Structures are given as structure tokens and as C-alpha cells.
């Protein structure tokens, strides 16, 4: 990987908290794939949870519910999601060094952040993109206040944020949302583009979703 920011979710939360303190102008694991034929030995097919785990282990593009359903008949999108959540619970309980995380409308097996150094020692570290304090500030505001427009970011920071936003977009951590339907903090239409975090942001910071962001004291956090 290249251009990996050397920051953590905890740093985002700290930056966001500091910014706010300043004045501004178990699943169905036992479910079996009964629709799948028995193998040549006459043994029953493996549980659907094991099939999903095997599909994830194979790797390749992120595994979607639709693709998994093609490989295992009877595997509905709802059951697929349930099985993924159950596997993750098992991994946490067993202290596994990996987990299943969302990526590009699907899921993939990935090392937990504390074990990424193992892969770097094996394959060599990717080139890091050091986020400036300004970029970290802006990314924290985008992460916790999204969708948020540049004018609101500038107002909260008391500084111009264009360069930092361009860097975050270039790194794939933030994306521009169309201006239609954008609203400011006082619920008035702004008519400007807004910024959101991306799936890559979740992947880089080791988050399953935005609910995994460290909690802050901000009552306006979405």
C-alpha cells in the first residue's frame, strides 16, 4: 500500500475534542447449507458460516452478499450479514489477529491494527503520507460532522481549509458530495459541496463503520 496516513482514530477524536473546546466565529452459526449437495463421501455439507469464512479466506475483490449467494444457495443477504457479524464476534472472543471489515460494498478479511506491523516486517512498510496538524483537524471535522461544507469547516477552524481538503481527497480519505441537499448546522441550505469520509478512510483507520469512531463530548456528533 502507498500513501497510508500515519494517524489513528484516537488521534482524530483527540483533534476533534480539542477543536470543540476552542471558541470559534450470536448468529445462525449452526445453520447448514442444506441446499448444497453432499460430497462424494456422503458427508453433510459444511455450515453456511464456514462457507462464508472460506469465501473470505480465498481473497480477491471484496465479497458481496450477492456473490456469496451465488456460491452457496439459500444464503440470503440478511443471513450473509448475520453470519459475518457472528464470525466477527467469534474472532473477538477468540482473540484472533484479524477481522472481517467492510470495503467497497463488500467485506474482506483484514489484520487488526495492532498486527499490521507483522505484515510490514514481512513485506516491507508502505510509504506513509504524514498528515499535517491542519489536515488532521479537517479530517476530524469531516469524520464527526459529515456531510460538512468547506465554509463550515473554515468557520469552526478559524482558518482556510482548502489545501487540507484537497490533500484528503487526493489520499482518498474524503470525497466531495454533490451540493444538492446540503444543509448547514442551522438547517439552512448552503448551496455548496459537502465532504464525507470514504470506505478507504474506514479501512485505513481500522474502523468497521462510523459508529466505531471514538466517542467525544460533542452532543452534535452524528
Image (cartoon, grey):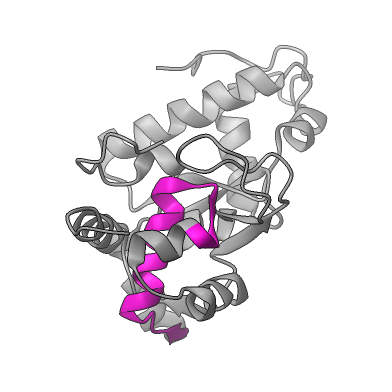
> Image height check: is 196 above or below 2?
above
Horizontal side, residue 80 vs residue 66: left or right: left
Residue 36 falls in image quadrant: top right
Position in image of residue 79 (x %, y %): 62, 18
Position in image of residue 51 (x %, y %): 62, 32
> Image height check: is 222 above or below 190?
above
Region of the chain picked out in magenta, as a range: 126-151
| Residue 47 appears in the picture as rendered | yes
150, 81: nearer the viewer: 150
Residue 188 falls in image quadrant: top right
> Image height check: is 49 above or below 113?
above
Q: How many marks?
A: 0
206, 125: nearer the viewer: 206
| Residue 46 appears in the picture as rendered | no
Identify the residue at horizontal 45%, vertical 41% (top origin): 185
Horizontal side, residue 162 vs residue 16: left or right: right
Horizontal side, residue 21 vs residue 107: left or right: left
Position in image of residue 83 (x %, y %): 53, 25
Was residue 129 drawn as part of the magenta stretch in this picture?
yes
Identify the residue at horizontal 52%, vertical 43% (top origin): 184
Was residue 187 drawn as part of the magenta stretch in this picture?
no
Which residue in the rendered view is the most extreme toward the right? 70
195, 56: nearer the viewer: 195
Quadrant occupied by the N terminus: bottom right
Quadrant occupied by the C terminus: top left
Identify the residue at horizontal 77%, vertical 13% (top origin): 35
Horizontal side, residue 78 vs residue 207: left or right: right
Amino acid at each position: 500500500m502507498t500513501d497510508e496516513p500515519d494517524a489513528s482514530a484516537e488521534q482524530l477524536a483527540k483533534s476533534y475534542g480539542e477543536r470543540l473546546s476552542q471558541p470559534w466565529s450470536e448468529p445462525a452459526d449452526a445453520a447448514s447449507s442444506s441446499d448444497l449437495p453432499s460430497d462424494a463421501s456422503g458427508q453433510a455439507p459444511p455450515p453456511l458460516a464456514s462457507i462464508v469464512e472460506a469465501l473470505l479466506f480465498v481473497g480477491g475483490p471484496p465479497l458481496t452478499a450477492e456473490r456469496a449467494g451465488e456460491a452457496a444457495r439459500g444464503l440470503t443477504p440478511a443471513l450473509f450479514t448475520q453470519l459475518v457479524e457472528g464470525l466477527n464476534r467469534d474472532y473477538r472472543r477468540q482473540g484472533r489477529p484479524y477481522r472481517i471489515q467492510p470495503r467497497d460494498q463488500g467485506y474482506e478479511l483484514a489484520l487488526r491494527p495492532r498486527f499490521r506491523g507483522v505484515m510490514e516486517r514481512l513485506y516491507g512498510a508502505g510509504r506513509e503520507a504524514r498528515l499535517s496538524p491542519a489536515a488532521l483537524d479537517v479530517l476530524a471535522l469531516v469524520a464527526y460532522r459529515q456531510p460538512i461544507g468547506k465554509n463550515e469547516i473554515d468557520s469552526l477552524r478559524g482558518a482556510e481549509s482548502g489545501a487540507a481538503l484537497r490533500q484528503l481527497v487526493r489520499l482518498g480519505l474524503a470525497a466531495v458530495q454533490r451540493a444538492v441537499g446540503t444543509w448547514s448546522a442551522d438547517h439552512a441550505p448552503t448551496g455548496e459541496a459537502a465532504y464525507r469520509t470514504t470506505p478507504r478512510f474506514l479501512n485505513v483507520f481500522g474502523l468497521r463503520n462510523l459508529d466505531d469512531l471514538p466517542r467525544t463530548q460533542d452532543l452534535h456528533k452524528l
